[in-house]
Amino acid sequence: MKTKAEKSIALAERYGANNYHPLPVVLERGKGAFVWDTEGRRYFDMLSAYSALNQGHSHPRIVAAARSQLGRLSLTSRAFHNSLLGPFLERICALTRQERALPMNSGAEAVETAIKAMRLWGYRKKGLPDGRAKIIVCDGNFHGRTTTIVGFSSDPDSYSGFGPATPGFLRVPFGSSKALEAAITADACGFLVEPIQGEAGVNLPPEGYFRRVRDICSRHRVLFCTDEIQTGLGRTGRLFALDHEGVKPDLVILGKALSGGLYPISAVASSSEVLGLFKPGTHGSTFGGNPLACAIGLAALDVIVKEKLPEKAKTLGTHFKAGLEKLTDPRIKEVRGQGLLLGLELAVKARPLCELLMKKGLLAKETHDFTVRFAPPLVITRPQIDQALRIIREALRDLP
Ligand SMILES: Cc1ncc(COP(=O)(O)O)c(C=O)c1O
């Protein structure tokens, strides 16, 4: 007799496209920093749906906002106004210190939106000849899974078999401001970068990189666009990862925790000079900016600010990182990260450790074979982190 979990996995594998390699755990419930499987076993969620759950699972204020909006009005499309869109966009602009915002659904859609916005600005404002705009991106980037985005990825798993790639992108090494400056030609309109490369293995650029990038982009009249989908909204110990260097980009892309994990919500925020270029009919989304999303997004942003989640990520992240650094296992190559976005790089493949951690009640996922990413919900407490550290120590001890 198959268990409920085994049946669920078998069905998903039989009828799904198998484009993921999940840990063999079937979850049914989540609260704060924890999730429960079909057998009622509790686990630490140390992935937070790739940082979409900064506010924790089922945050009561966000759930209440969703409940009160459900059954009132969920979708209007942008053919009509809705009463919550303005307040939501105003809130995003206040927090990002930008002038306008454009709401979408998934992170990849918001990245596509930013690409279109930068190209449009290149033609309309910088005067580039039509069809010539170039956007510079980084080696090791991860910005989503659409055809255009995977076309400028340097990861063969992402792009192989999905060509031809969209032209107009150029890659430079992540963290090298010299390489960026050397790559800028007259037809460059934008530079798109993650503040920390999450999917590539929690890679941080050298100190001062983004101040240098800001200066280079301003001098060459190239838009500086940061993808804060994974690093933003408190994750790294500041509201936005770029705040660590006191730098304001020209465009910022948000997603994931913009909904606290209840709903797909994303947005691009920028100046009127950039986002003001879109005219009716030039861009859109049926669900983008719908009233249910706005109600959830407003509550999700409120929780981040009112519960001081960036500050929590900073102090708890320092504590967690110090705990990981104390682990003495010779297979540990490096502990890196900022706030509660941490990577433990091993000299051996990371998957067996993740499977062992799962058996011991902690869910974390390997990224790019050798690194385990630890990114718990920011509502986690210090005693819970200590408990998680004990599990990690034990799992390393038992790892063959
Ligand atoms: C930095 C970054 N950009 C974009 C995306 C894509 O977001 P989505 O999966 O919602 O399309 C992700 C998702 O992991 C991400 O981490």
Image: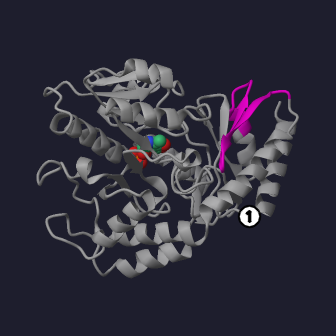
Q: Residues within 10 Å of mark 1 (few under 14, many from 20)?
A: some
Residue in front for this viewpoint, 270 or 349: 270
Number of marks? 1
Q: Position of residue 202 (x, y in %)?
A: 61, 36
User: Viewed as shown, does residue 306 lie left or right of 81?
Assistant: right
Q: Callout 1: helix, strand or loop?
A: loop
Q: Residue at x 74, y 31 (%)?
A: 334
Residue 16 quadrant: top left
Residue 272 quadrant: bottom left
Relative to 90, residue 354 above or below: above
Give the residue pinned by disc 1.
Answer: 381
Within the magenta stretch, is there residue 44? no
Q: Residue at x 22, y 40 (%)?
A: 121
Relative to 184, residue 341 above or below: below
Q: Position of residue 367 (x, y in %)?
A: 59, 34
- For the record, the magenta segment spans 330-353
Ligand 1 shows up in which quadrant of the image? top left
Q: Position of residue 268 (x, y in %)?
A: 34, 51
Q: Mark 1: which amino acid?
A: Thr
User: Viewed as shown, does residue 127 lie left or right of 29?
Assistant: left
Looking at the figure, which quarter contains the C terminus?
top right
Report if the beta carbon of the residue with label 1 is closer than 8 angstroms to ligand 1: no
Q: Residue at x 40, y 81 (%)?
A: 68
- Whether residue 291 is visible, yes or no, is no
Residue in front for this viewpoint, 15 or 224: 224
Q: Position of residue 237 (x, y in %)?
A: 63, 53
Q: Residue at x 57, y 59 (%)?
A: 54
Residue in front for this viewpoint, 121 or 67: 121
- Whether residue 379 is visible, yes or no, is yes
